[in-house]
Amino acid sequence: MFEVIPRLLRNGQIELNETLLFEAGDEINNYSTVPPDQKHWMMRLDVWLEKRELLLNRKFPVGILISSDTDLAATLGKQGDLLQSPLFKTTEVAFIAIDFPSYTDGRGYSLAQLVKSIYGWHGELRAVGDVMIDTVFYMARCGFDSFLIKEGHDPLLALEALGTFTEQYQKSYKLPGAADS
Amino acid sequence: MYIYDDVDQKLVEQRVAQFRGQTQRFLKGQLTEEEFRVLRLQNGLYIQRHAPMLRIAIPYGMLTSKQLRALAYVARRWDRGYGHLTTRQNIQFNWLRLEDAPDVLAKLATVQMHAIQTSGNCIRNTTTDHFAGVAADELINPLVWCEIIRQWSMLHPEFAFLPRKFKIAVSGSMTDRAAVGVHDIGLQAVESNGIFGFRVFVGGGLGRTPIVGKLIKPFVAWHDLLTYLQATLRVYNLHGRRDNKYKARIKILVKDLTPEVFANEVDAQWQLIKGGPDTVSEAFVKSIAGKFKWPEYELNTEISDTFYFSRLSADTQFNRWSRSNFHPHKVSGYAAVTISLKATGAPPGDISADQMDAVADLAEKYGFGELRISHEQNIIMPDVRKSDLYMLWQELQLLSLATPNIGFITDIIACPGGDYCSLANAVTIPIAEAIQNRFSDLDYIYDIGELDLNLSGCMNSCGHHHIGHIGILGVDKAGEEWYQITIGGRQSGALGHHPNHDLDQGLDQGLDHSGLATNGLATDSTSAAIGRVIGPSFAREQIPDVISRLINTYLRLRDSEEERFVDAVHRLGIEPFKKDVYADPLLSKPLTLSKETYV
């Protein structure tokens, strides 16, 4: 069940993807309600929200997976509540992943913008699912900084594709690799 | 004309390099058909009936002689010697090879042109009034704002994979010649308390579900335009339907949520980004305006008018052409001229490479080397000295480009139809020709007056049939071609849409309209209307007779020569027209046969 070919683009490197999605009540996890305090676990946003109290002070914080049809405002509450007590802290959350069920489903780009600029997430934002050589550039501009490249697409070419354009028109979307403003 | 700086140039060149790599990967089998499909669409490349079709953007309709010559070169070298102007200020080539597409795009990049986002579910080429920048009735110059929107929308990282295509139109005049009411977003310039801004209409569109756009924001100040667009697109991107392609346009979302709720959602998103980095500054507007090369008009024009008027009275044919193809200019002594691409027998909007070269030459000889493309599929020479009109007309005649029919029944808008397009149910080009042949008497078509006749080969409505005063739609019934007729559509309000044939009126009207705008009493300039179906469909051969009967009914019932066909339809309803058409036993005959196409 473990992947052998590295395809996770992260910090300018190509790494092996060792992430495991935790399914509550899964037999593999001995029916526990939260994953063991080990590396590489990721939980769906709704499950994470529900079990949040049980996940504090872990040695290995979990990642969160957001599906493309998530209504963030409805799930997380309006911005006002969040600004008072930020929901996602890098001490509690390893990374946030947004799923692209198909590369033509562009909701993930807007979700990334909301997670970063509205909900104030400053940690790793990962694109997963139908992530292509041809889409990582726009993804990076929308705030993603790691990319699980789909099988059949050369991760090295994807790494190069982060430099496809060296100029930009839209001021609020930085170029890949540029410092946060 | 907007002149690219280094950033603009680099972006189009890097886009060509990106697409070249993608095409190579596809040809080597490293990209699947499905993966490549959207990538090629976003570079203007469709797979069509005969070959791939390439759609090239002519942003806001503006084109230089040099660019038109490059298009002629493309037509000769990679296509079959002609191109087709679309209803969205693009040009299409129908006979390209996929392998050549990157070279074509590289050639276009050398003249500051591209095919980026001319297709696919993204923000398409922004369109405007084809008289933008020279019209006498402008509140703002939409060219500058269209360029600002072009830059903002081009390679936009968040909105490249929307639920469906997205079209923006901008009108800077009080007379809406950009059809802002039938676009996903229509922007109408207005002034409020001494600041100018835009009224924002959302959710208009043709296609399967024709709807006129709803006013969701009566005023967005100019500096907030881009953040407001960003908020609107974000709401659509997150909430537009993706489960059904026919319900995916923003008009369905606006309808489902109601315009009020949609407007509130946009406002909530907008508050989060308003005043942010994409806020437009005065310095930015100035820098964009400064990158345009504006015409240097000669202001001493008294003599030129005299010669023009003497020719008008001396030459009837010139007089006719001038009445129909002339548009008033903001600068006294100049005129904007429409070159009709609607000569009988030529597919509407088609232009040959030789004609492109010739028009490019004329634009340099009788203007500033600039041209415009209209959504009615004609070419505009925007800055002709009145003293030159007569010579220009003589030269155009030699090129078969002096058809005096602008705004009349034979100035037909048509998509390429079943002869080229794989989506079409029916052919359009032979129908257009049959109608043009029927209405070949110029005195008669002038008597009929202003009439928009629009023709689409299928429900995708590329020929804008819903907003034709008379609309013709090709429908498929058991593999046969039938045509459905609508009447009473219009692209903009009844007020101020008359072609301005009176030379002296133009400037006065412009001032009036500006006056209206400053007082905040703007007319409802987006009162576009969707035409109504008159009844069961017709066979191809019947169409000219149907049109004739509609016209006869109009001529009999109009209250004066001033009342246009479309106004008469709105006053009388469709009943008298319908009754007269189907009273003809030959036309009512297929009534039972094609009942299912009567929708």
Image (cartoon, coloured by chain):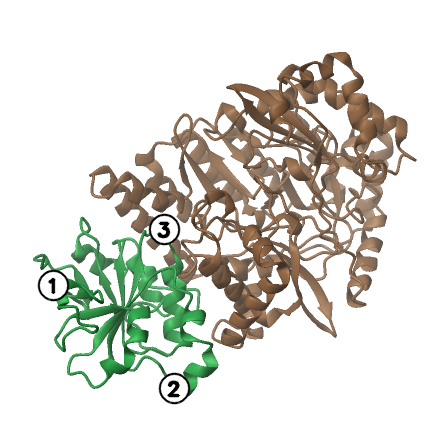
Chain colours: A green, B brown
Disc 3 crowd rating (10 Å Cα; few below 14, some 14-19, many 20+) is some
Q: Can you tell which quarter of the image residue A17 is in?
A: bottom left
Q: Are marks 1 and 3 on the same chain?
A: yes
In the image, is residue B67 above or below residue B579? Answer: below
Subunit bearing disc 2: A
Q: Can you tell which quarter of the image residue A9 is in?
A: bottom left
Amino acid type of the residue tagged 3 in the rendering: Thr
Q: Which residue is mark 1?
A: A16
In the image, is residue B40 above or below residue B544? Answer: below
Q: Which residue is mark 3?
A: A104
| x 68%, y 69%: residue | B196
Image location (x, y in percent) of residue B574: 79, 33
Q: How far separated are the C-alphas under marks 2 and 3?
A: 34 Å
| x 48%, y 53%: residue | B123
Disc 2 crowd rating (10 Å Cα; few below 14, some 14-19, many 20+) is few
Say left or right for A50 vs B246. Answer: left
Mark number displayed over residue B236: none
| Contact (Cβ within 8 Å) of mark 1 with mark 3 | no
Image location (x, y in percent) of residue B364: 59, 43
Determine the secondary structure under disc 2. Answer: loop
Q: Nearer the viewer, mark 2 or mark 3?
A: 2
Q: Are marks 1 and 2 on the same chain?
A: yes
Q: Nearer the viewer, residue B137 or A136?
A: A136
Amino acid type of the residue tagged 2 in the rendering: Ser
Say left or right for B350 vs B552. Answer: left
Q: Which residue is mark 2?
A: A85
Residue B574, can we see it? yes
Determine the secondary structure under disc 1. Answer: loop
